Amino acid sequence: MGRLFGTDGVRGVANADLTAEMALGLSVAAAHVLAEAGTFQGHRPTAVVGRDPRASGEFLEAAVVAGLASAGVDVLKVGVLPTPAVAYLTGVLGADLGVMLSASHNAMPDNGVKFLARGGHKLDDELEDRIEAIYDSHRHGEPWERPTGGGVGRVREYTEGFDKYVAHLIAVLPNRLDGLKIVLDEAHGAAAWVSPEAFSRAGAEVITIGAQPDGLNINDGCGSTHLGSLKAAVVEHGANFGIAHDGDADRCLAVDHTGEEVDGDQIMAVLALAMRDRSALRSDTVVATVMSNLGFKLALEREGLRLVQTAVGDRYVLEEMKEHGYALGGEQSGHVIILDHATTGDGTLTGLMLAARVAESGRSLKELASVMERLPQVLINVPDVDRSKVSTSGELAAAVTEAERELGATGRVLLRPSGTEPLVRVMVEAADIDQARSVAERLADAVKSALG
């Protein structure tokens, strides 16, 4: 069996790849692994379970709850809430485990199971590997040790979670949003009720789109992966700007008053300056992945700030932030982590903090985002090559060196082997789009020649 856990839990087509039996078995396995690790020692364990609105989340939630309760874990069902809300509640309620059912920005037929450790943090890889191993052994016949009588878990609805999370969001805002008109695209997802409530309580005039989830329409032509409707709505309503979330609302992208996209790099640039001005940007440092636009790094440097870059994936950003105590990090995709107030990317929190900066500064989002100029970026996927030789090919190294010499300080080259397919991604940034395209095409040819 290949590894079930990816970078963000277990995902697949619901009821095909991810079945009720699997969700139940993984939940029982998680309870056993955490018990063996001493997480439950000396007390009766509790788990927080939430989900996004996908239809499949209804039966998968039932399976997860049944698995946990059968293993002796009390369960608090918080219903449809964003991933960062489940993480927050897991921490603030002192729960031993959190479970979120979502496939984030994926299409509706997919779903996923994500386990969170005490405090609302992502489980370590080692614990995920142990959960998978134990799940696999019991799937093939090894019996579970099961509590009986009063030892089984109890299940109750925890409806207070909504207000507790919204109150937390409002409490950490540095200022109110009075006077702002904001369009929110909720992707028919997990933030459909939370996000409008939070923005409204903070004082903004709110217009919502994509906020009528029916279990089937999540991410369907809306949200952070489809910004067209939001751009049109912002211009139509004369709004100050718009905010778009994905299905589980751990991401945030924005649109300024002219309908122009403001991506995750630009959002982090705006927030970095706002946090610096409040003395909240520790070590004057932001963490991002190597895929962030070079313009982001140049903008921070002009402001006397530092960018630390990691491998692609929010987990690597978070690891770097936690290890060195940095306060702000994220990805170009809009997955932004404000570590003082959240243990994971929080799209609603990010949007609120962005709005707070607009309100406090009296400047438009377009003007604030102009602190960073996005350099033209060309990405070419080169298929059917030996991706394992990217770092060892002398021919390829020479081609990269020549490209870097041509681009100089205002350009960048990145060759990245795919983690799942036999292809190599060639990314080139330059001050001029034609130069970026020309260099990228030459490097793609070099990859074919050296690794084909």
Image: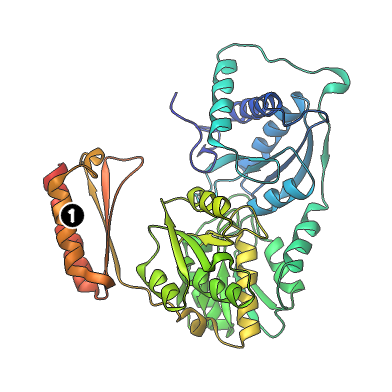
Q: Quadrant of the N terminus?
A: top left
Q: Where is residue 385 in the image (x, y as percent from the top left)?
A: 20, 41
Of residues 328 and 381, which is closer to you in this image? 328
Q: Quadrant of the C terminus?
A: top left
Residue shown at the point (60%, 66%) measured from the top left:
350
Residue beneath disc 1 = 444
Q: Where is residue 54 in the image (x, y as percent from the top left)?
A: 61, 47
Of residues 219 and 272, which is closer to you in this image? 272
* Count of marks overlaid on the render: 1
Residue 312 visible, this orientation:
yes
Q: Position of residue 96 (x, y in %)?
A: 74, 37
Residue 182 visible, this orientation:
no
* Quarter of the view holding residue 238: bottom right
Residue type pointed to by label 1: Ala
Q: Where is residue 34 in the image (x, y as percent from the top left)?
A: 68, 29
- Left or right? Give the position of 319 relative to 385: right
- Left or right? Give the position of 446 relative to 326: left
* Quarter of the view holding residue 435: bottom left
Tell me the SS state at disc 1: helix
